Amino acid sequence: MGLLADLDLTKQIEEKSKYRKKLEQLQLDLLHLQPRLRQTKRNLILVFEGPDAAGKGGVIKRTLERLDPRSVRVYSIVKPTAQEYANHYLRRFWIKLPGYGEIAVFDRSWYGRVLIERVEGFATKEEWRRAFDEINQFEKTLVDDGAILMKFYIHITKDEQLARFKKRDADPYKRWKINDEDWRNREKWHLHNEAAEDMFAKCSPSHAPWTLVEGNYKWFARLKVLKAVVRRLEKEIGRI
């Protein structure tokens, strides 16, 4: 049994008013920490991975929506362009890294090399196996230079994913969120989980560990991530 199988996905916040109150307080705490970060030679890098429809976008929105957007960048990582294919796969991430005092959020990331590219065969076995060390070295370089790097894997059950897919497909305002590729990825659910477990084992050093987030209940996932970010910043740059 791996880490994903051991997650308790039944966690939830029962009262909406309680959720709103906790969310607003954490957002305010993060807002107060943002100018403190800007005064340092450090930056904040947030990485989000997880199955399709796990709620990554919702978590990112609630984490950032109260911040000053002038020093925040969000990157939704999709298939590389032809020009990007002509370079080392990490290059397109290097050029997106935040400056000192800034925040960058990656909705999917360099871990695509050992996740989707591995499962779908877009990277050879030699390439994705080599990537574990390449990624560890890349992240060590960032952390040594002062980056506060946080990596979140938001997980949901296969049944919960199916329910969300059907809900999106039935809603004309959300139908753009789902496509044929999402449905095809469900057919390789166990392979994606296997790749993720391998990633946790080989790319979770003490300076850049993975945080697994129970995503079946969106409110719980949003609060868990926000709380983790606030507590980490308080530890790294001082309390408010």
Image: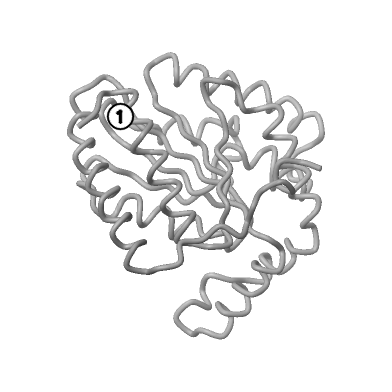
The residue that appears at 49% across and 54% down in the rendered structure is: 221
Residue 225 percent across, percent down from the top left: 44, 46
The residue that disc 1 covers is 234
Residue 126 percent across, percent down from the top left: 80, 29
Q: Nearer the viewer, residue 45 or 109?
A: 45
Quadrant the C terminus occupies: top left
> Quadrant of residue 153 in the image?
top right
Identify which amino acid the numbered label 1 is placed on. Answer: Glu
Tag 1's secondary structure? helix
Residue 128 shown left or right of residue 60 in the figure:
right
Q: Nearer the viewer, residue 204 or 186?
A: 204
Residue 238 percent across, percent down from the top left: 25, 24
Tell which residue pokes out farthest to the top in this image: 144
- The vertical placement of 49 against 38, above or below, is below
- The vertical placement of 26 against 220, above or below, is above
The residue that appears at 58% across and 63% down in the rendered structure is: 53
Residue 154 percent across, percent down from the top left: 57, 50
Q: Nearer the viewer, residue 188 or 75?
A: 188
- The vertical placement of 135 against 76, above or below, is above
The residue that appears at 41% across and 34% down in the rendered structure is: 45
Graded by Cα atoms within 10 Å as few (under 14), some (14 to 19) or many (20 or more), the crowding at tag 1 reads: some
Quadrant the N terminus occupies: top right
Residue 45 shown left or right of residue 102 in the figure:
right
The residue that appears at 43% across and 39% down in the rendered structure is: 46
